[in-house]
Amino acid sequence: MGLGKKTVEEMDVRGKRVLVRCDFNVPMKDGKITNDNRIVAALPTIKKLIENGGKVILCSHLGKPKNGPEEKFSLAPVAVRLSELLGKNVVFANDDTVVGENAKAAVAAMNDGDVVLLQNTRFRKEETKNLPAFSEDLASLAEVYVNDAFGSAHRAHCSTAGVTDYIKETAVGYLMEKEIRYLGNAVNDPVRPFVAILGGAKVADKLNVIENLLNKVDTLIIGGGMAYTFLKAQGYEVGTSLVDNEKIDYCKEMLKKAEEKGVKLLLPVDTAVAASFPDPIDAEIAVEYVASNAIPADKMGLDIGPKTQELFAEAVKSAKTVVWNGPMGVFENPVLAAGTLAVAKAMAEADATTVIGGGDSAAAVMQLGYADKMTHISTGGGASLEYLEGKELPGIACIQNS
């Protein structure tokens, strides 16, 4: 299956002003960037546009400014870091209105291959409401638009979608292309057998994902805190484990749907239990392993047990496509990370396309040292989830088809 969207590879940008929506929403402490992964991830697209002689105008949001411009949410530190990484001066256009006199003057003075960074798009109240006035202002600076911010693609904002009402030549950047190619195609056009692994704490967060994936997978594996609601739906005692009582009927429906569709739905067969949740989260903890249908009434399930680790690993190793979203247990605790580690290891060893669907599972894979063994680690949180739900993302839908 092709990408279906125009990419930066297909564009002639020489001498043209190109507005690029990046994801520079980086963690900051006291005005210093504490992790520049997202900036580094944006470099290939930016470098490609510089090499091809475009005039590169970058924009992004940072944090959630509530009342318009706030100094602590300024993108000034990002301009400094970008200049260092690109080895060339990135002009920071510091306008509270984002598209003000500084931005207009900086863009007017650009030569081919120059780079300008605009101020935080959320300094304009219109941004998150996708109001035409700001979309038009942004569009007035450029002739071409490139979206490379997958983490914001599920939002219809001025800088992610609205601007395309006024700029007709549009494309996705390399990061976005990779997300569509791996996350999108893994779900919509998988090489079979297709196995999806869902974990994390709450069933409620994954309702639509479960339902969408049951229509597509050969095997659905459920671990993490959400597994206990499924176990309770099967009539088992789950002790003091996390349970969403309002979703028990939903879980029963899903178990039935899996059976009707001939989808193998795997739940934990044994569980690591303890007297209570670790406090602090990485504190030493005494656990015992019990069968999932024999959890003591006064104990809490906090990870999948060794038999389940084997069961899940076997399913993963027989797959050709694996998508994973959500840890198998409280992976922040060394004792309770065993289940998540086992799944990561099985994926690393599988002869398959392996996709990590963002959020906590991305953090877990990185923390456990398996990141370089995966085909693709999605950079989105909410965007990845909505993609797995089968939704069309506004930030992708608005880009020209190839």
Image (tube, rainbow, N blue to C red):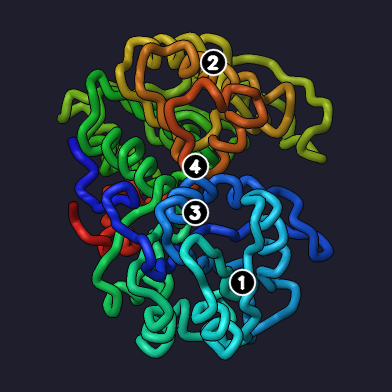
Return the disc, 1 or 2, that comes first in the chain's sequence. Answer: 1
Quarter of the image where one finds residue 103: bottom right
Hey, which quadrant is residue 225 in on the image? top right
The circle on residue 91 is: none
Q: Residue 1, relative to residue 379: is it above or below?
A: above
**Which of the pair 397/386 is nearer the observer?**
397
55 left or right, relative to 94 = left
**Circle 1 is placed at which residue position?**
64
The Cα atoms of the two marked residues, 1 and 4, are separated by 20 Å
- Disc 2 packing (10 Å; few <14; some 14–19; many ≥20): some
The reply to whether the C-beta atoms of the residues labelled 4 and 2 are less than 8 Å apart is no
Q: Check disc 3: other Cα within 10 Å, few if <14, some if 14-19, many if 20+.
A: many
Residue flagged by tag 4: what amino acid is it?
Gly
Q: Which residue is drawn at 22% across and 34% down?
A: 216
Q: Which quadrant of the rendered structure holds the N terminus?
A: top left
Under circle 4, the secondary element is loop
- Tell which tag, 3 or 1, sits nearer the viewer: 3
Front one among 347 and 30: 30
Residue ID for mark 4: 358
What's under tag 2, amino acid-wise?
Answer: Lys
Dot 4 or dot 2, earlier in sequence: 2
Q: Which mark is residue 345?
A: 2
Amino acid type of the residue that numbered disc 3 sits on in the rendered structure: Ile
